[in-house]
Image (cartoon, rainbow, N blue to C red):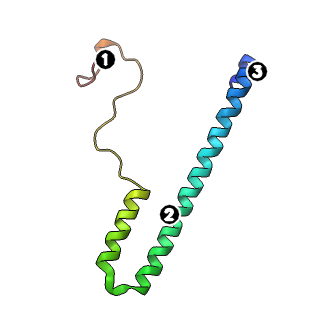
Amino acid sequence: MAANVLKSERACQVSVAVVRAFIQLRKISVSHDALAKKLAQLKRAVNARFAHYDQEIETLFSALAAIVDPEPEDHPKRPIGFMPAGQRPKDVPA
């Protein structure tokens, strides 16, 4: 990465920090997947045991699912990058 081009101590430190950040992201992703699996397993167990409380349990798990995996935002994101004045969409400020 940067250390391969710049050959400085600071570039080496930045490269190590980038790799560590990606390792942290992978750990978070794995823990998120594990949490989702455990939540699904819990849902199956609770539904089997308390079938007569279906509506309340479904409401609870819907709320938990919304916390674990939120819906994407409705409004479109502003494009990133430089656009010359003649190529900008009308809704993008200068």
First of labels 1, 2 by sequence position = 2
> Which image quarter holds the C terminus?
top left
Q: Residues within 10 Å of mark 1 (few under 14, many from 20)?
A: few
Residue to which mark 3 is pinned: 9
The amino acid pointed to by label 1 is: Gln
The amino acid pointed to by label 2 is: Ala
Residue drawn at 30 percent across, 19 percent down: 88
Label 2: state its secondary structure: helix
Quarter holding residue 59: bottom left
Q: Position of residue 62 (x, y in %)?
A: 35, 66
Report the label total: 3
Label 1: state its secondary structure: helix
Q: Of residues 81 and 9, which is closer to you in this image?
A: 9
53 in relation to 40, above or below: below
29 in relation to 94, above or below: below
First of labels 3, 2 by sequence position = 3
Label 3: state its secondary structure: helix
Distance from label 1 to label 2 (Cα)?
43 Å
First of labels 1, 3 by sequence position = 3
1 vs 3, front mark: 3
Residue drawn at 33 percent across, 73 percent down: 58
- Tell me: 58 left or right of 26: left
**Which disc, if any, is residue 87?**
1
- Tell me: 45 left or right of 17: left
Residue drawn at 72 percent across, 17 percent down: 6
Labels 1 and 2 touching (C-beta < 8 A) = no
**Which disc, if any, is residue 36?**
2
Q: Of residues 63 and 74, which is closer to you in this image?
A: 63
